[in-house]
Amino acid sequence: MLRIRGTVGDLPVDLTLELDDGDWARLGAQLQATPVASATAAPVAPVKPNDDLWQGAQDLLRKAGQLSGLELLDQLEGLAGDASAGKRLLVRLRHSAKVKVSSGADTPLYSWVGD
């Protein structure tokens, strides 16, 4: 039998697990097969947004003045090198105070209003 007591947030937890010999053997085998992260492992550095890409995205829209969402996304994907990075830049532009997003016929229109 294994008893676990503690809290999850503000909620108290009192859990009892009943394991037979086969369960303990499988658990022990699993623990041996799974490497445990070392407490001395280097911490993972937070991902910083690429300021050069962000500046490039702003310059692209600034020079164009206005682009449809599809055109802008296509150009951002080319600038960033992949679709997911291009989409992140598009979202960042959408929320920028320097960009106005309005409804177009089929796709939003992104207009540069900053500077």
Image (tube, rainbow, N blue to C red):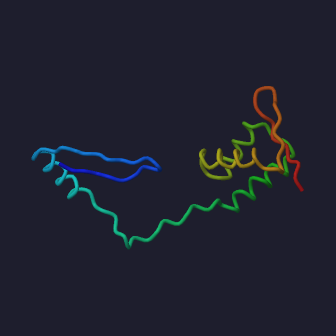
Q: Give the side of residue 51 with respect to residue 4, left or right.
A: right
Image quadrant where residue 49 sits: bottom right
Image quadrant where residue 54 sits: bottom right
Q: In this view, does 21 lie above or below 37?
A: above
Quadrant holding the C terminus: bottom right
| Near-viewer residue (77 or 115) | 115
Q: Where residue 86 sits: x, y (%)?
A: 65, 47
Q: Which residue is drawn at 69% across and 49% down?
A: 89
In the displayed orientation, state which residue is furthest to the left.
Answer: 21
Q: Give the side of residue 6 with respect to residue 85, left or right.
A: left
Q: Where residue 44 sits: x, y (%)?
A: 48, 65
| Near-viewer residue (28 or 55) | 28
Q: Where residue 69 sits: x, y (%)?
A: 75, 37
Q: Where residue 79 sits: x, y (%)?
A: 68, 52
In the displayed orientation, state which residue is furthest to the top.
Answer: 105
Q: In this view, does 111 lie above or below 33?
A: above
Image quadrant where residue 38 sits: bottom left
| Near-viewer residue (26 or 78) | 26
| Near-viewer residue (62 or 93) | 93
The number of numbered discs placed on residues in the rendered structure image is 0
Q: Which residue is drawn at 75% across and 44% down?
A: 94
Q: Give the side of residue 16 with respect to residue 94, left or right.
A: left
